[in-house]
Image (cartoon, helix red, strand yellow):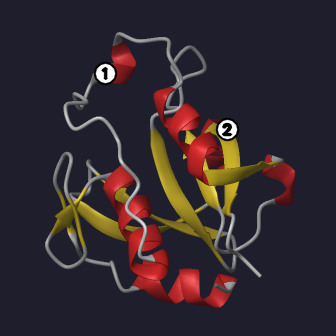
Amino acid sequence: MTRNEIIKEALEWQGTRWQHQASLKGVACDCAGFVRGVYKNLTGTDVPIEADYPATWHLFQKEERCYNTCKKYLTEINITDIMPGDVILFAYRKSFVAHHMGIVLPNNKFIHADQDVGLVHVTAFDDTWESRMRYAFKFNEVK
């Protein structure tokens, strides 16, 4: 797969409404479901995750669950090396584990399923989002 294919597929999810634990383009997804859905639609491989993860697990856990799951299926890269089509993980506070993710787009933007906005949308990397970045990955299949 190419980075352009990842970007094209990710952008097709724009407007998909946010719903915890969902992962279906045009219907509903959460941030993990969005990345899983893009990956599945491009590779045909479903990434299993715990079906019972609570929406607020990051408030009570110190386990890097998102990071550990991404490490199983993606290749970790340095945050400073991100390129369009890569997956970025965020934590909202320094004391929290990474619990939000999106896909990097060209022109200093990313796309993600945003609970606060209620849907998948494009966001610019500003100082706040850059300060929240914790980990970065690329799809193993990227050419």
Q: Residue at x 69, y 64 (%)?
A: 140
User: Above or below — where is 22 with respect to 109?
Assistant: above
Q: Which amino acid does label 2 sit on?
A: Ser
Q: Which of marks 2 and 1 is in front?
A: 1
Tell me if mark 1 has few (under 14), some (14-19) or many (20+) residues whose alpha carbon lies within 10 angstroms of its own.
Answer: few
Q: For mark 1, what is the residue? A: 57
Q: Residue at x 41, y 54 (%)?
A: 47
User: Which of 140 and 54 lies nearest the eye of the viewer?
Assistant: 140
User: Which of 13 and 65 lies nearest the eye of the viewer?
Assistant: 65
Tell me if mark 2 has few (under 14), some (14-19) or many (20+) residues whose alpha carbon lies within 10 angstroms of its own.
Answer: some
Residue 13 position within the rendered picture, expressed as x and y whole percent measured from the top left? 33, 78
Residue 20 position within the rendered picture, expressed as x and y whole percent measured from the top left? 19, 46
Q: Distance between the residues labelled 2 and 1?
A: 21 Å
Q: For mark 2, what is the residue? A: 131
Q: Which residue lies furthest to the front in this view?
A: 45
Q: Which amino acid does label 1 sit on?
A: Trp
In the image, taking residue 75 as reference, residue 34 lies left or right, namely left
Question: N-terminal of the two: label 2 or label 1?
Answer: 1
Residue 124 position within the rendered picture, expressed as x and y whole percent measured from the top left? 57, 66
In the image, taking residue 87 as reference, residue 40 lies left or right, namely left
In the image, taking residue 12 as reference, residue 67 lies left or right, namely right
Residue 24 position within the rendered picture, expressed as x and y whole percent measured from the top left? 21, 70
Quadrant containing the N terminus is bottom right
Q: Residue at x 19, y 79 (%)?
A: 26
Q: Which mark is residue 88?
A: none
Asked which secondary structure carries label 2, the reply is helix
User: Above or below — where is 15 with respect to 140?
Assistant: below
Quadrant containing the C terminus is bottom right
